[in-house]
Image (spheres, rainbow, N blue to C red):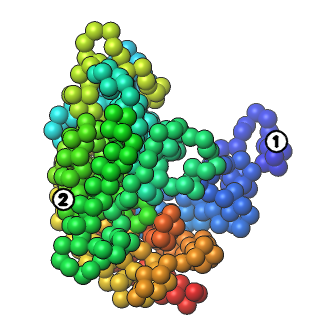
């Protein structure tokens, strides 16, 4: 019991409407355990409470407005406050609020599976719904292992992924994640995962920084070939899958060099290793297509997705598997002995269906493709600041890499990073009206991933706020 309880009668528990701002902050501090956050942040008074969303903007409990330059967390594709999505949820909840997909089906999950499969590349026809992205990654690894056992390759179970890549927090997904700092508190994790280099061209080995026109392509070929090296090192008979994002988020938004995924596909075919495209961020319009694999023209064996599938109006994820992978489960007594109570939740499925209908009706992918050059050009203006080393990304998904010395590409040490990112940038950007993310998993980077409804006026607003705050940041170094 806390001080709040003592002010409230036993028969009426406090609701958020009853709370004044100060009460809310107090109750949050005492009871709400934030994710990936220091609980001490409450004491510093640095935990904003967001009460409302309108289009591309968020509003906090004090009435301040912020441009949502991160779409919540790479989620809110259509922006905030859409009553059509809210109504789709309410209608479904009234009709059939819950039914699991364990041995029974319901219409919205069926329709959504058909629709998602129709957008997915090639023969990715089988949709396994989950509650979010980590569960989709977890499901993909389990399917890969199970599949190979059923087709007579029982030793294939290992996974290859890239350095600094984030794939989720479930213990399997965390094991695939390439961020040692996130893993150490929970080790030992699931064994059998191995890392290869990512496609961070800014930090590419010197041999690919010669200034020659083909540096990027050669770097991509080399990075892809490291997957073959890892497969050989581990033993091809033991490797089940490689997990890659179309554009890797963590570390600073690394697009694939030209030819990278084509070479990865060849390697996967040569060694019978499954290519899992982890599109938890990159799917549903983030890169101007339903799936990132389409943008870069490669055929995965599995796609994992979540976030934008509902634009955040309900939680949902999915693993989309090829006909080949479903085949051993289609006949006879075999089953994929895996599932989640809330996988394919009717309300989430109804919202996802409405979301995808709006994508078509409002031409969301086309809008992103039409606007993406403007977004890039606007962000690239920031390259004139000494602290901005690199602006990298695709579609509506960018990272702005901060460096101490632009000429030498020297990065910040841990103390400087702490002072710059946590001590100044995160709060200064927010106070200036921009919700985005300053991250130091790798080089310090500002991540931008706005709602897909944004246009040039929003890009200009982002650039202006970033310019003024980054200019001030330079003086603090
Ligand atoms: C590429 C990728 N995979 C998996 C995940 C985990 O998704 P969730 O947080 O929905 O479990 C994320 C989350 O950001 C992600 O970016």
Q: Nearer the viewer, mark 1 or mark 2?
A: 2
Q: Nearer the viewer, residue 420 or 324?
A: 324
Q: Quick check: 267 left or right of 386?
A: left
Q: Can residue 317 be seen here? A: no
As drawn, 166 above or below 426: above
Q: Please say whether residue 342 is visible from this viewpoint.
A: yes
Q: Position of residue 348 (x, y in %)?
A: 39, 36
Seen in the image, is 222 located left or right of residue 136?
Answer: left
x, y percentage for residue 409?
43, 81
- Above or below for 468 versus 134: below
Viewport quadrant of the C terminus: bottom right
Relative to 271, is 418 above or below?
Answer: below
Which of disc 2 and disc 1 is earlier in sequence? 1
Residue lying at the far bottom in this picture: please name it.
475
Judging by the rendered image, the residue that carries numbered circle 1 is 1
Q: Is residue 159 left or right of residue 413?
A: left
For the point 55% across and 66% down, which residue is it? 63
Q: Which mark is residue 462?
A: none
Quarter of the image holding residue 89?
Answer: top left
Q: Residue, x 25% and y 36% (percent of image)? A: 272
């Amino acid at each position: 019991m806390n001080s709040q309880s003592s002010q409230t009668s036993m028969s009426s528990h406090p609701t958020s409407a009853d709370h004044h701002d100060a009460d809310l902050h107090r109750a949050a501090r005492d009871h709400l355990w934030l994710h990936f956050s220091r609980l001490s942040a409450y004491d510093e008074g640095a935990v904003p409470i967001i009460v409302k969303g309108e289009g591309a903007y968020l509003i906090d409990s004090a009435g301040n407005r912020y441009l949502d330059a991160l779409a919540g967390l790479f989620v809110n594709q259509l922006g905030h406050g859409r009553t059509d999505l809210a109504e789709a949820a309410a209608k479904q909840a009234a009709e059939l609020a819950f039914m699991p997909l364990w041995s029974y089906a319901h219409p919205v999950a069926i329709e959504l599976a058909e629709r998602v499969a129709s957008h997915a590349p090639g023969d990715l026809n089988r949709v396994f719904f989950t509650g979010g992205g980590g569960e989709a990654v977890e499901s993909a690894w389990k399917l890969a292992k199970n599949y190979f056992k059923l087709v007579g390759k029982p030793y294939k179970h290992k996974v290859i992924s890239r350095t600094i890549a984030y794939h989720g927090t479930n213990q399997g997904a965390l094991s695939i994640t390439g961020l040692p700092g996130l893993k150490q508190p929970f080790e030992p994790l699931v064994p059998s995962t191995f890392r290869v280099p990512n496609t961070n061209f800014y930090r590419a080995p010197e041999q690919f920084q010669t200034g020659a026109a083909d540096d990027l392509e050669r770097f991509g070929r080399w990075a892809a070939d490291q997957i073959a090296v890892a497969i050989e090192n581990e033993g091809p008979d033991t490797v089940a899958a490689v997990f890659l994002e179309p554009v890797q988020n963590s570390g600073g938004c690394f697009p694939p060099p030209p030819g990278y995924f084509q070479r990865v596909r060849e390697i996967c075919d040569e060694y019978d290793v499954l290519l899992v495209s982890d599109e938890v961020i990159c799917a549903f319009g983030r890169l101007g297509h339903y799936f990132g694999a389409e943008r870069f023209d490669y055929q995965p064996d599995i796609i994992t997705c979540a976030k934008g599938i509902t634009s955040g109006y309900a939680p949902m994820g999915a693993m989309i598997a090829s006909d080949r992978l479903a085949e051993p489960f289609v006949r006879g007594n075999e089953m994929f002995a895996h599932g989640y109570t809330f996988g394919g939740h009717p309300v989430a499925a109804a919202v996802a269906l409405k979301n995808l209908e709006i994508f078509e009706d409002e031409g969301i992918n086309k809008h992103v493709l039409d606007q993406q050059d403007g977004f890039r050009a606007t962000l690239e203006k920031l390259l004139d600041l000494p602290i901005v080393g690199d602006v990298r990304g695709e579609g509506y998904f960018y990272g702005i890499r901060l460096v101490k010395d632009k000429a030498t590409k020297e990065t910040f040490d841990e103390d400087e990073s702490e002072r710059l990112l946590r001590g100044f940038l995160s709060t200064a950007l927010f106070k200036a009206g921009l919700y985005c993310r300053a991250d130091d998993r790798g080089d310090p980077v500002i991540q931008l991933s706005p709602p897909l409804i944004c246009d040039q006026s929003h890009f200009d607003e982002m650039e202006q706020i970033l310019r003024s705050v980054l200019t001030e940041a330079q003086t603090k170094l």
